Amino acid sequence: MIRHWLVHNWFHHILVTVGILAVFGAYKVTLQRMGSQAGEVLKLLVVMSTTREGRMGSRVVKFIQNELGAKYDITILDPKELDLPLVRMPIHHYDDRTQAPQVLLDIEAKLKAAEAFLFVTAEYNGSVPPALSSLLDHFPPGHTLFGYKPSGIVSYSMGSFGGMMGTVPLRQLLNAMGTVAVPESVHVPQVHSSLDEDGKVQGNDHLKSGLESLDTQLGWYAHSMKEYRKIHGVPKL
Ligand SMILES: Cc1cc2nc3c(=O)[nH]c(=O)nc-3n(C[C@H](O)[C@H](O)[C@H](O)COP(=O)(O)O)c2cc1C
């Protein structure tokens, strides 16, 4: 009886088998595509905030490179190396962009290429260090460089609060530039003793787990925004 059913419905069986194989094949391809997207290396621009001789910001950047260097394609934007004056002419005020200083064109290219930002900020007098705000003031807010991309904040200080107060106005500034600052942030207290000169953590376990949480959010937002930008572009706002 079963043999009879099998023999007489052979065409139906082949169709069902081909159908199942096609569904599994499509499922596998979708999973592979999702995996490769999630595994794509994001371009992360780490932006420093100070220019002081003997500054502690370098330790924090090394800590970030040690922890996240294998995961992101990291570029550092360092106001000390750039040696920018206070704003005389923002790049978007030049009618002819070719007249803009090369240093501004180079920074603009880095900002444009970035898929996520990480701001490493000290707290100067309860606020954002001027080297950082002045650096940002050279570039247009909105969709061309900062918009529709996420940013994270790692603050530090020699005091107990890790520069937390400076992150409040920084969030406002980043919002004005157009980048979305993710809710998690890291605050490095007593930076001079929490991190050694190579950025190695000296007994404060919260720093690594804090950075991990920030990275989880930043990566999630950055991948999501990147995929959505690919499909829909960005509004000119
Ligand atoms: C101009 C200036 C202002 C500062 N203001 C603060 C402050 O408001 N709160 C704080 O916790 N530390 C403050 N500090 C101490 C910094 O936390 C400490 O010097 C830190 O290392 C600064 O970052 P940097 O080494 O990268 O310059 C200030 C330091 C400087 C030089």
Image: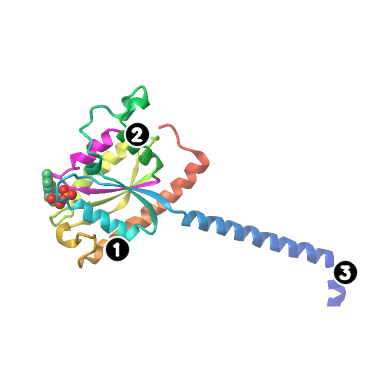
Question: Few, some or many C-alpha atoms within 10 Å of disc 1 (few <14, some 14-19, many ≥20)?
Answer: few
Magenta span includes 72: no
* Left or right placement of residue 193 versus residue 16 in this view: left
Residue type at numbered disc 2 = Leu
- Which residue sits furthest top? 95
Question: Considering depth in this image, is 51 or 204 the residue closer to the camera?
Answer: 51
The answer to whether residue 211 is left or right of residue 54 is: right
For the record, the magenta segment spans: 115-140
Q: Mark 3 points at which residue?
A: 8
How many C-alpha atoms fall within 10 Å of the one at disc 3: few (<14), some, or many (≥20)?
few
Q: Mark 2 points at which residue?
A: 105
| Discs 3/2, front | 2
Image spot of residue 193 (x, y percent): 15, 61
Depth check, front residue: 28 or 111: 111
Residue 138 inside the magenta-drawn segment: yes
Horizontal and vertical percent for residue 20?
Answer: 70, 63
CB atoms of marks 3 and 2 within 8 Å: no
Q: Give the color scheme: rainbow, by chain, secondary structure or one colour.
A: rainbow
Question: Is residue 212 visible to the viewer in this orientation of the structure?
Answer: no
Residue positioned 47% across, 57% down in the render: 39
Of the residues shown, which amino acid type is indicated by label 3? His
Q: How far apart are marks 3 and 1 (CA)?
A: 64 Å
Which residue corresponds to the image point at 51% horizontal and 58% vertical from the top-left?
A: 35
- Is the CB atom of the residue marked by disc 2 within 8 angstroms of ligand 1's nearest atom? no
The correct choice, above or below, for 126 with respect to 144 in the image is below
Identify the residue shown where x is 50% and y is 43%: 230
Residue corresponding to mark 1:
209
Image quadrant in which you'd find residue 176 = top left
Three-letter code, disc 1: Ser
